[in-house]
Amino acid sequence: MDLATASIKISKVSKSKIDTLDFNDIPFGKSFTDHMFVAEYKNGTWSDMRIEPFANFSVHPANIAWHYGQALFEGMKATKHQDGSPMLFRPELHSRRLNASAERLAMPAFPEEQFLEAVTELVKLESAWIPPNEGSALYLRPYMVAMDEFIGVRISSTYKFVIFCCPVGPYYNKPLKLKADDNYIRAAIGGTGEAKAAGNYAGSLYPTKLANEEGFDQIMWLDAKENQYIQEVGTMNIFFVIGDTVVTPSTDGAILKGITRNSVIHILKDKNYKVEERQLSIHEVIAAADSGELLEIFGTGTAALVANVKGIGYKDKLIELDLEKYKVSPFLKDTLNGLRSGRIADTYGWNVKLS
Ligand code: COI
């Protein structure tokens, strides 16, 4: 059946594949829903906005993004309120961050109004795929990719913007052991670290593989200049509870401005926790661990939500914490999950209900 909203043409599948999904066992990022949103950019404008059956694309071998990585993505979540309404979590912030990434990568902005219309229509159509269990969600993956068929290095003149959906459980299913890497870096000031550039993730793979071989789950990146100031972890921003204060690295141009990070800081301040966004060195963290003041380490991210860190290795030093004593991190996880299920009243106005 074909339908149309103001600007989106909708073509539906004849039969849903939702029966193939086990809602009690959803590995991250491997199940895809029936439909996706697609728009094309050419001659300086976005057009052909459509929701269509989820399917492969045909790509020219000289596709410029495949060679030079002019590609970006977002990650956002939809959940279901206890009353059954689908909800989006802070979608306008994702739209703005997507466009900030696009600017850094010389890609065209995707208008916020159309972004919100696209995620709204897609999630309404796929609402049966939103997992009911608290802590699970429908993960939306908006992305933009250069489409010129040309292998000279220059800004593409054509792009594809796509949003597809994956029902997901938690990204990490166990507490993490991190390596503070003193050899490789993720991002330098002036680089693309603040953007959700596909290439940022490609560059992290080899150092992460080496860290995995040493028994660590993820890398905690240090700054590029002095190799001591903490930036972020593989797929998350990072927080430390030191004494009565929650400390997180200030976003300095090389750190992703996490929307979960922003939400967590807001909740903590609202509940009268002391929060500091500032430079934080690995040496300060080690000193706090040695003096017994380091109480918790956790990461935040859209996919990860709030993930506990049980230890950090740096050179020959290993910090290990007692997860049983964690209080702030479980409180935040419970609050975010509660807000996203309607169990806790959304006094912040972060959920956008779709019906
Ligand atoms: C997200 O949290 O949405 C991310 O972008 C992490 C992703 C690389 C899995």
Image (spheres, rainbow, N blue to C red):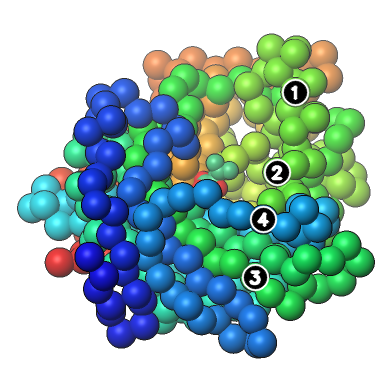
* Amino acid type, label 3: Tyr
- Estimate the x, y position of residue 277 in percent, counting from the top left: 60, 54
- Residue most toward the left? 83
* Ligand 1 lies under 8 Å from the Cβ of mark 2: yes
Label 1, label 3: how far apart the Cα atoms are: 32 Å
Query: Can the viewer see residue 217 in this picture?
Result: yes
Discs 1, 4 touching: Cβ within 8 Å: no
The mark closer to the camera, 3 or 4, is 4
Residue at horizontal 22%, vertical 33%? Answer: 19
Which residue is labeled 1 in the image?
209
Which residue is labeled 2 in the image?
201
Which residue is labeled 3 in the image?
159
* Ligand 1 lies under 8 Å from the Cβ of mark 4: no
Quadrant where the C terminus sits is: bottom left
Disc 2 secondary structure class: helix
* Amino acid type, label 2: Tyr
Residue at horizontal 41%, vertical 27%? Answer: 27
Disc 3 secondary structure class: strand
Residue at horizontal 90%, vertical 49%? Answer: 225
